[in-house]
Amino acid sequence: MNIITLIQNELNENPQLPFYMIFVKALQKGLENNILTAGTSLPTHRQLAETLSLSLGTVTRAYKEAQKHSLISAVIGRGTIISPPSNNIDIVSEQKKYYDLSFISPFEYLNPSLEDALKHIDIHDKELLKYHEPRGMLRHRKAGAAWTQKFGVPVSEKNILVCAGAQHALLSILIGLFRAGDKIAAEAITYPLLKELCQRLSLQLCPIKMDESGIIPQHFELACKNGDIKGLYLMPSCQNPTLTQLSEFRRLELVEICRKYDVKIIEDDVYALSLEQKLPPLAGLCPERTFFIASTSEAISGGLRIAYITSPDEYLECIEQSIGYSISMAVPLMAEIASYWIESKIAEQSLWAKKEEAAARNVITRRILDGFSIETRSTGFYAWLNLPPPWTNESFTKTAKEHGVLVADCTQFSLVSPPAKHAVRLAICGIEKREDLSHALTILANILRSPQ
């Protein structure tokens, strides 16, 4: 049975429904009953319209609706394919019976004291309860500039916009800079939320080949020559999920390519401060076309939801409009707390404590998974485990879950299908007790050593 048969069955059962709902129902039933599988190619809009004697506009709307439900995705060179099922990677799960290594929750038990913060900020300040311009209050932007400078970005409050977390910052940039159909380049294995946002905004993601050092500049330039690339998304210092770090030479190469082909750069380096080694950010090498996202979640508190965008002068207004359209403004009270923690150096102290804990956990991870292909950084918050054959993303993730451990497999991060690698990301920062982490990693090591 194929998608055409599934659609015809739905048409017979629910003739009163509009076609876009029929199409979504057919896809959902096909996936639930294992008739359709992730990676399966679908007919083009025109082919489906001709087969079912429908208008092209009717079919196009149905495909857009299915994309909104994350059932299908557009892949350069392959057309439209069935999307892999979502495991809520990087979305908080309420699973209580598992050791959760799938979600990066950076040592939340080491967060600063909210009670202490509320004692030191002026809770009678009525300005914190008023509407303000979407870019944020001046004093909050000054604190944001100070925080962003810790990433090595030379910036003043004039070029800072306050957002409700890094995800909102990324959304605001995508809405402000690009239009439906625009092409955004990213590494073939990349941050999963980028995939979701681009699907919902009808932006085309172009996967670029990568190696152990990250994105390959020559392949990026080839994509620019062939495809009118409008934007480039990168995590250059500590890529999620592979932990790769772009060398200074590659950064310079990429900057020159972006200037040559007029490509805007989105630098989302949220884990850069967790590392000791510092390289010049792209925003410092190419400030006229780079949009830098500086998050506080990883260092201070995931629930604070404050991040800062650094924008070139000519794009400040359109980014500010995006913030205004989406949430009006970041919550001033949250921004005030973030400002206090930044200015009092508490944020730095919290980050230092988390890096110390991360260092100990990376030692544990390397010891328990010794002998396997595991990528770690000395103070990184997660690890990248390359699976030995015959393990696949699906089989290992399923087996690990059966043994009580949740992991994030490469399928969730890959922009190509089948996935670029068989590997899993292990968030070593979310489990509070080291002994529980050790137990979870030991379970994974035993699975890897046992015959499949």
Image: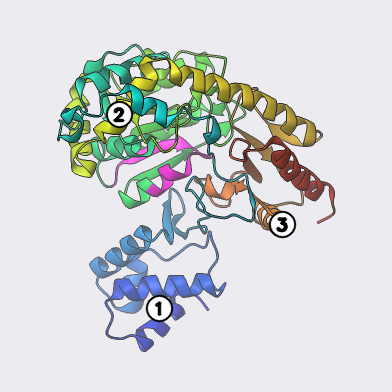
Q: Is residue 57 above or below residue 316?
A: below
Tell me the residue that label 2 is attached to. 335
Label 2 crowding class (10 Å Cα cut-off): few <14, some 14-19, many 20+? Answer: many
Q: Is residue 35 above or below residue 128?
A: below
Tally of numbered discs: 3
Label 3 crowding class (10 Å Cα cut-off): few <14, some 14-19, many 20+? Answer: some
What's the distance in space between the residues labelled 3 and 2, CA to CA? 42 Å
Q: Secondary structure at mark 1?
A: helix
Segment tinted magenta in the rendering:
181-196
Tell me the residue that label 1 is attached to. 7
Most foreground residue, 133 or 43 = 133
What's the distance in space between the residues labelled 2 and 1, CA to CA? 49 Å
Q: Residue at x 47, y 44 (%)?
A: 192
Q: Is residue 66 above or below residue 297?
A: below
Q: Is tag 2's residue or tag 1's residue first in the polypeptide sequence?
A: 1
Is residue 262 visible in the rendered image? The answer is no
Check residue 312 in the rendering and tell me which mark sits there, or answer none.
none
Q: Residue at x 32, y 21 (%)?
A: 144
What's the distance in space between the residues labelled 1 and 3, CA to CA? 34 Å
Tell me the residue that label 3 is attached to. 399
Amino acid type, label 2: Ala
Q: Can residue 183 be found in the magenta stretch?
A: yes
**Residue 210 locus on image (x, y percent):** 55, 33
Q: Residue at x 35, y 84 (%)?
A: 11
Q: Is residue 254 left or right of residue 308?
A: right
Q: Can residue 374 be found in the magenta stretch?
A: no
Amino acid type, label 3: Thr
**Residue 313 locus on image (x, y percent):** 20, 19
The image's colour scheme reads: rainbow
Most foreground residue, 331 or 5 = 331
Q: Are marks 3 and 2 in contact (CB under 8 Å)?
A: no
